[in-house]
Amino acid sequence: MRNSEEVDRFDGEASNTSMISGASSPYQPTTEPVHSRHVLGDIRCDTEYLKSNFGILKIIEVGLSIIAFICIETIMLCLPCGGVYFFEFVSCSASVVTGILLLIFSLNLHVKVPHVNWSLTDLVNTAASTFFFFLSSIILAALNHNSGSEIAAVIFGFLVTCVYGINTFLAVRQWRKGEGRSSAVQTSEYTRARTASRGEVEAQPELQ
């Protein structure tokens, strides 16, 4: 009996000791809920971008590209058809790519992928669309200018070329400003690092 009482008392002291040590231990299991990170949880429509010059220009570009594509699609007979097919491809591709970029910028999706240079991406798209719309409109005007649909497609092609040209000019200015700021930041960081390293070298005692 005495041995059993001593064993019970020892077990009770051990359990109390473990409870005390557990309460005072800094390695406690966390009970805070782990919140899952929703990458697309902060999607919202950026009305300020839609009201800006780039937003308005992109809306006009998508609209004119779609109209030009509809005009070229209404052509029932073409001879030759190379200019018609080329203009059809350019208008369709430009409307899709520009529409995707408009969606990305208006929903602030570009901030979710910061490692992509979106200013340069927009510049490449607008410059390429300007060149190919201008080229396809000239080819279509030279080869196919008989029907009203062909003439309307040529007119809208030159109109959207002008809009893309304005957008390219603004995109170049924005890209240069961004490059200037990044180069200034890199220069200041390099100067700060050189100054700090020079100060550390001067602070070290000379070895005899």
Image (spheres, rainbow, N blue to C red):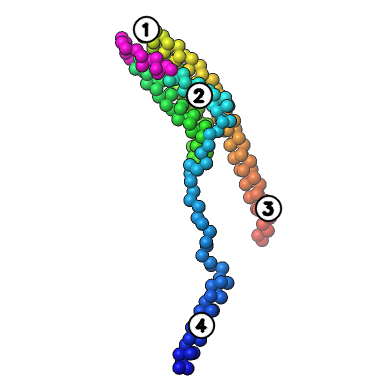
Please state, as top left, top right, bottom left or bottom right, where the C terminus lies in the image: bottom right
Q: Is residue 24 above or below residue 75?
A: below
At mark 1, the secondary structure is loop
Q: Residue at x 62, y 43 (%)?
A: 189
On screen, residue 177 above or below 162: below
Q: Residues within 10 Å of mark 4 (few under 14, many from 20)?
A: few
Question: Between marks 1 and 3, how big is the CA–CA gap?
Answer: 81 Å
- From the image, state whether disc 2 or disc 3 is nearer to you: 2
* Amino acid on which the number 1 mark rests in the picture: Ser
> Which residue is the site of mark 4?
12
As drawn, the label of residue 147 is 1
Disc assigned to residue 23? none
- Residue type marked 3: Glu
Question: Which amino acid type is marked by label 2?
Answer: Ile
The picture places residue 53, in percent across and down from the top left corner, at 57, 24
Q: Earlier in the sequence, mark 2 or mark 3?
A: 2
User: For the residues marked 4 and 3, what is the alpha-carbon distance in whole angstroms?
Assistant: 65 Å
Q: Measuring 51% from the left and 65% from the top, which residue is drawn there?
A: 29
Marks 1/2: CA–CA distance: 28 Å
Whether 136 is among the magenta residues is: no
As drawn, the label of residue 202 is 3
Q: Nearer the viewer, mark 4 or mark 1?
A: 4
Residue 200 appears in the picture as rendered: yes
Label pair 4/1, CB-CB below 8 angstroms: no
> Which circle, 2 or 4, is nearer the viewer?
4
Of the image marks 1 and 3, the number of the one nearer the N terminus:
1
